[in-house]
Amino acid sequence: MDLVLGLFLIFFGCCSNVYTLELLVKNEPGSGHLVTFAQFLMVSIEGLRHHLGYNGFQHKIPLHNWFGIVVLFVITSVLNNYALGLNIAMPFHIIFRSGSLVMSMVIGFLFFKQRFSLRKIASVLIVTVGIILSSLQKHDMHYTEGVFVLVVALVLSCFLGQFQQKVYQKYGSHWREGLFYTHAMALPFFYFLKSDLQRQWTQYSQSQPIAVFGYQIPIMYVYLLLNAFTQYVCISGVQKLASVSTSVTLNLVLTLRKFVSLLLSVYLFQNPFSATNWTGAVLVLIGTLLYSDLFGKHR
């Protein structure tokens, strides 16, 4: 039952999250900071019921371990959403973030003395070619800047993953605690983005109103709330599935989910996607599945 629930939360939550995110950036391309803040706030509020007790905040991992992770996490999240306002189409955004396999291998080899099998190296090369083919499209200076932002976010997210892994190896895998503190401790950083947040909130308030339970609410507020909620559902699904399945199953499901999101983005929003781009997308899918050793005996 937990497996079925995890699958439902991932495909419903994550795909809906991508859909609502695209609705937001299509209407207001500069929505990145406000979207990120809303997502962090939603996860933090929900997490209070698990970690706020009579004696204050409860935790099993010393809080100082989260400081560096929080800085990397908030910067990575802000950059990923900010890139969507720089002429980066959602399909390419989805595919490019699959490049974490490539960057994780490079960073693991250079900085953490990790070694990889020939199969994994070949898989990463396939993913790399796929990403290159997916990026072949007409572009301008904003697009180039957007790709640079995504590259920086990708590098930081890989270091983030390495640091999180070390913390969990030392203190145990308290994923719900990690989810809460990485989001809640990041909220003060958004003070430095308050002018952008205020501007984006004002722009949202001027959007077309719709009736919600008898009240007229700007439609962008509704999209924002749905995006924050589905982000929480998506994260919960990933963690739920991770707790009841193997890493191979998790990687397979997340890869298929990305591909479904890609199909929905191209179909529902009529995003241009050439035959070359589709070839790249398929190569990324194949490379990711090979990396996960889906058809092997060992993971």
Image (spheres, helix red, strand yellow):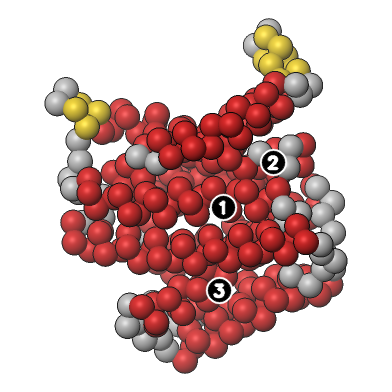
Q: Quadrant of the C terminus?
A: bottom left
> Residue 233: horizontal and vertical position, in percent?
49, 40
Mark 1 and mark 3: Cα distance apart in space: 24 Å
Report if the CB atoms under discs 1 and 3 are less than 8 Å apart: no
Image point (50%, 87%), residue name: 121
State the residue lying farthest toward the left: 55
Q: Residue 264 at what x, y percent from top left? A: 73, 51
Q: Amino acid at mark 3?
A: Thr
Front residue of this view, candidates 202 and 163: 202
| Rendered image: mark on residue 179 | none
**Residue 273 image position (x, y, % from top left):** 82, 63
Residue hosting label 1: 79
Q: Is residue 17 above or below residue 222?
A: below
Disc 3 from disc 2: Cα separation: 31 Å
What residue sits right under mark 3 in the picture? 288
Figure quadrant of residue 128: bottom right
Tell me the crowding category of disc 2: few under 14, some 14 to 19, or many 20 or more residues within 10 angstroms, Cα based. Answer: many
Residue at 19% across / 61% down in the picture?
A: 170
Direction from residue 50 to residue 71 in the image, left or right: right
What's the residue type where badge 2 is placed? Gly
Q: What residue is disc 2 on?
A: 30
Q: Amino acid at mark 1?
A: Leu
Q: Of the residues tagged 1 and 3, which is closer to the observer?
A: 1
Considering every residue shown, the one lying at the far top of the view is 214
Position of residue 67 relative to residue 132, above or below, is above
Query: Closer to the N terminus: mark 3 or mark 2?
Result: 2
Tag count: 3
Q: Residue at x 73, y 71 (%)?
A: 134
Q: Is residue 33 above or below residue 241?
A: above
Assign a secondary structure to mark 3. Answer: helix
- Side of 52 relative to 272 (left or right): left
